[in-house]
Amino acid sequence: MNPGTNSIAFLSIAFAIVFCLLVVGAHWDRRDDLRPLSASLSTYFAGSSRSTMFFAYASLAIALLCVSVSIATISDVPYRWLATALCVVSACCLIPIGLTARRLVGDPDVRSQRTITLHRFFALGAFLLIVGAMSAYAAGVATQGLSSSGTMVIVIVTMAAIVNFAVVLGSRPGPTYGLKQKGLTFLVVIWIAIVATQLTLPPAVH
């Protein structure tokens, strides 16, 4: 295995961890204007945690780009190029989410209708594309058999993400909307870590 591609896989894990730490940091400062269970992640782009969330989403984008490179260069499963392409486009959708998010919470939304529409488009697109990438990769590894524990975990996490995405898509802002959305994001981070780890292990360990 090329040490360079191996390092890229580890970088995806590292940046996924950085994303988690930054999100925790954004939630650490208890704010009266936000309720963690109901507020979506993009809501934290408003106010004092705006810069923290930009760094968080940038870290997640880098993690997705790194794992896409690992899938393309290390993996030999079917549909790997589809999974790679979807990961890359999903990563490109993350920064525009922050750029089109509200800057202040509680005040009237002064964004134009175009900006609001773009924000929803990029947010939905990012989740749809990454769930599609997860599904494509899971389908690819499943064709090689479900005997290994790593493959089973990937398939289970992917199925959970699909169900969670459907739940989020069918939900309206409410007391637990943020929890559902953050749960989906957590599954994405877990998937990145599992795939990157599996790709760095010898084939016999898979």
Image (spheres, rainbow, N blue to C red):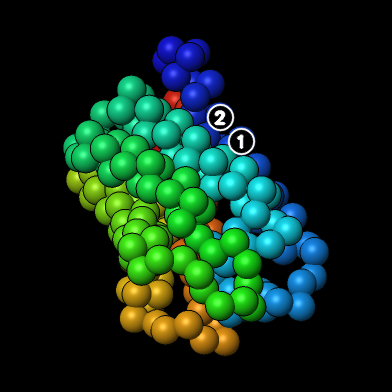
Give the residue displayed 53% in from the left and 21% down from the top: 7
> For mark 2, does the 10 Å Cα neighbourhood hold few (<14), some (14 to 19), or many (20 or more) residues?
some
Mark 2, secondary structure of its residue: helix
On residue 96, the disc is none
Q: Residue at x 43, y 49 (%)?
A: 96
State left or right for residue 64 relative to residue 114: right
| Residue 194 visible from this viewpoint | no
Q: Position of residue 89 (x, y in %)?
A: 31, 42
Judge from the rendering whether residue 15 lies leftward or rightward of residue 147; answer left or right. right
Residue 52 x/y as whole percent: 68, 49
Give the residue pinned by disc 1: 14
Q: Amino acid at mark 2?
A: Leu
Q: In the rendered view, does 124 fall on the left or right side of 103? A: left
Q: Where residue 160 appears, x then y in whole percent?
A: 40, 66
User: Residue visible at 42% across and 84% down?
Assistant: 172
Q: What element does badge 1 sit on?
A: helix
Residue beneath label 2, please?
11
Please provide percent x and percent y for residue 39: 59, 74
Do the residues bearing badges 2 and 1 touch, measured as CB atoms within 8 Å? yes
User: Which quarter of the rendered picture does the C terminus lie within?
Assistant: top left
Query: Which residue is at 36% across, 69% downward?
Result: 113
Task: Give the answer, above or below, for where 1 lies relative to 103.
Answer: above
How far separated are the C-alphas under marks 2 and 1? 5 Å
